[in-house]
Amino acid sequence: AGEWILMVTAQTPTNIAVIKYWGKRDESLILPVNDSISVTLDPEHLCTTTTVAVSPSFEQDRMWLNGKEISLSGGRFQSCLREIRARATDVENKEKGIKISKKDWEKLHVHISSFNNFPTAAGLASSAAGFACLVFSLAKLMNVKEDHSQLSAIARQGSGSACRSLYGGFVKWIMGKEENGSDSLAVQLADEKHWGELVIIIAVVSSRQKETSSTSGMRESVETSLLLQHRAKEVVPKRTVKMEEAIQNRDFASFAGLTCADSNQFHAVCLDTCPPIFYMNDTSHRIISCVEKWNRSEEAPQVAYTFDAGPNAVLIARNRKAASLLLQRLLYYFPPNADTDMNSYVLGDKSILK
Ligand code: PMV
């Protein structure tokens, strides 16, 4: 056969958990200690774009992230590649005269090039978009017939939160019961049109890489935090039921209350870990106070906040009016590049004030 190359490009947005995943019951399969619920962001911003290519001239699997070659030898990449390859089916491209049989995929190598349009590992869930996109684009390339939920169980083995990025809108990662992880997967609770008036603003407090990776942070919390045990057994099961109701009914007061409480409990678990983990900084705390004060001064909450494994605030406003008032307040109290360590604000698909 002559030289040929076959390529697929896909784009996957990141997702932000409103009920957090924190703690694994199985580290190698990435099985969580509780269910989690997230909102998938607009695909226009905070997304990963991945191109995967296959050619008989490729001698090994290789990957580039933001233009720099990275190693694929880690167990997580290997799990995703192995699981997708195992499900590859025949591919025929008549235009190029290419025919790849199911068996050929075992010998063929892939090249993967991935770009994030946001800072990597700064608590903006870059691995979520990254692994979801990797699995999705490889599945397309190899003509994998599995549905999104089944693909989510593969993306989960790259990064837990990645399983939730296979769907848009509101998504639940069901922790599952099986030891092999087959039922630990994502399902869509409501699509992106369901609650269209919500507006998400991200305050990029710091774009530096976080100090404690989520993997080691979770391990330390599971080993040392009693609050984590209580949270997983007693709090999250009830909270997810309430959160699903709030989403179905577009009940913002309940949604905001649950979102803020869950973010705060996740960071309390981090403090309860030995040694304690600090993901938020002074600016994060000041943003929380600012939102809490404002919500209390109104008849009903206007904004919900949530923070992942980093200091950046994800703010969810009930509608456009609340979002524009929020942005005014943020710019007043936290002007970028002044004495705050604020970098920029990201709203919709626009980056405001670098
Ligand atoms: O999937 P990971 O290992 O990046 O962990 C993500 C953990 C949080 O972002 C803090 C919470 C979540 O549910 O996304």
Image (cartoon, helix red, strand yellow):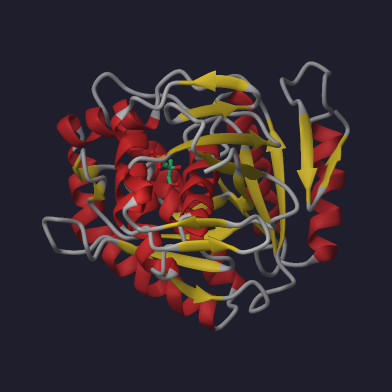
Residue 27 in sight from this viewpoint: yes
State left or right for residue 109 relative to residue 291. left
Q: Position of residue 220 (x, y in %)?
A: 23, 27
Residue 121 in sight from this viewpoint: no
259, above or below 79, in the image: below
- Residue 172, picture quadrant: bottom left
State left or right for residue 211 relative to residue 229. right
Q: Position of residue 70 (x, y in %)?
A: 49, 21
Viewer-closest of 38 and 271: 38
- Residue at x 35% of width, y 45% of height: 80
- Residue at x 65% of width, y 23% of height: 67
State left or right for residue 342 relative to residue 245. right
- Residue 223, picture quadrant: top left
- Residue at x 61% of width, y 71% of height: 252
Q: Residue furthest left?
A: 179
Viewer-closest of 42 and 130: 130
Ligand 1's quadrant is: top left
